[in-house]
Image (cartoon, grey):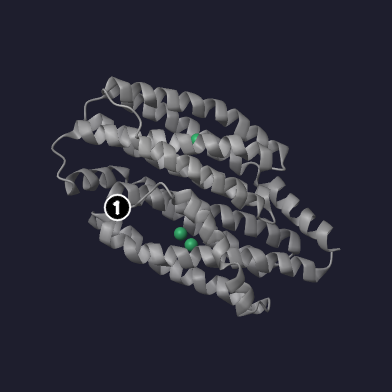
Amino acid sequence: MAANTFNEQLTKYLTDVHSIEEQALAQLRLAPRVAGDSELRRVFAEHLRETEDQERLVREQLDRLGATPSTVKDVAGRVGGWGMILFARVNPDTPGKLAMHAYSYEHMELAAYELLRRIAERAGDRAVYDMAQRIGSQERAMADRLAGNWDRAVEASLREKGAEDIGKDLVKYLRDAHALEAQALQLLETGPKIAELEALAEVFREHLEQTREHQRLVDGRLAAHGSGPSRFHAGAMRAGAINMGTFFKAQPDTPAKLAGFAYAFEALEMGAYELLTRVARRAGDEETAAMAERILAEERMAGQQIAATWDAAAELALRETVGGRL
Ligand SMILES: [Fe+2]
Ligand SMILES: [Fe+2]
Ligand SMILES: [Fe+2]
């Protein structure tokens, strides 16, 4: 394979992670205002410093490979669009939602570096390989730190709103979970048609069945509280789904992007159920807490199964580029 083809490919993925880091910087600068808890604030501040280093390291590799600023600018919207679809339903206006959003974002970053590392390995580029490995483990560590702070995030969320009626809060969290499952259904129904990778399509199909059950279970708990899903959510979700299909089909490497996106989406759902478990327990609703824990385990498993397709997705991404160019 021609060296310049590999370099083009590397430059493309470096550009992607660079725009991910720029978006991360913007989010991390705002995070302390919403964090609502001193430990969470510290965690975000620490990762802001790490992220500043990451952005610089990626930029240095782009310079080394001779990427022009215009190349970098060209694709800056791409990953931004990715994040926009992923987080369209999450307005991180409470400490809980912020932690959930950040947890998912770290998984998106991790997926992007896992992909970059695989491309660098095949290109024989040691510097990019080492960098991707190092930054990837920082993203994973940040996700783990956030995961160690769900209690604090819930505590701060409920405290900030001065929640007198925990029952009302619980219904809100159930509705959020319901809305996320609706979005998941759209992703998993569209996914197999655009995956181009049988292993990934299969994970989507399997998880689609689980997801239907998740939504049914959440519906049941909403009904138990004399409530139902929010109508606003249902409408907005359909609009988001149309964008998603169009967006991924427009990507030059759909399977790899989709595998990263879906991984981050599972993390978003995990975050939602971590929060729901805790809010339910505070409300004394053991049944909802047990349900949330059970669903959480399936979301985690789905995330792991998606990650298991990354090798094949990276192979496919390289093959497609090379096939198209040589
Ligand atoms: Fe990062
Ligand atoms: Fe990060
Ligand atoms: Fe899921």
Tell me how many marks there are. 1
In the rendered image, the vertical position of residue 84 relative to residue 171, given as above or below: below
Amino acid identity at mark 1: Asp
Q: Is residue 232 left or right of residue 326?
A: left
For label 1, count other residues whose C-alpha is less than 10 Å away and answer few (under 14), some (14-19) or many (20+): few
Q: Is residue 326 left or right of residue 111?
A: right
* Residue 195 at x, y percent in the picture: 67, 42
In the rendered image, the vertical position of residue 198 relative to residue 146, given as above or below: above
* Residue 34 at x, y percent in the picture: 27, 57
Q: Residue placed at 69% from the left, 62% from the top?
A: 120
Asked which quadrant contains residue 293, the reply is top left
Q: Residue placed at 55% from the left, 45% from the top?
A: 242
In the rendered image, the vertical position of residue 102 relative to residue 12, given as above or below: above
Q: Can residue 63 be seen here?
A: yes
Q: Residue placed at 57% from the left, 61% from the top?
A: 78
Asked which quadrant contains residue 71, the reply is bottom right
For the C terminus, the image quarter is bottom right
Asked which quadrant contains residue 48, the reply is bottom left
Ligand 2 neighbours mark 1 (CB distance < 8 Å): no
* Residue 37 at x, y percent in the picture: 23, 54
In the rendered image, the vertical position of residue 43 relative to residue 207, given as above or below: below
Q: Is residue 127 left or right of residue 226?
A: right
* Residue 275 at x, y percent in the picture: 33, 39
Q: Is residue 209 left or right of residue 326?
A: left
At mark 1, the secondary structure is: loop
Query: In the depicted view, which residue is nearer to us: 291 or 41?
Result: 291
Q: Residue placed at 82% from the left, 59% from the top?
A: 324
For the N terminus, the image quarter is bottom right
Tell me the residue that label 1 is attached to: 93
Q: Can residue 273 be seen here?
A: no
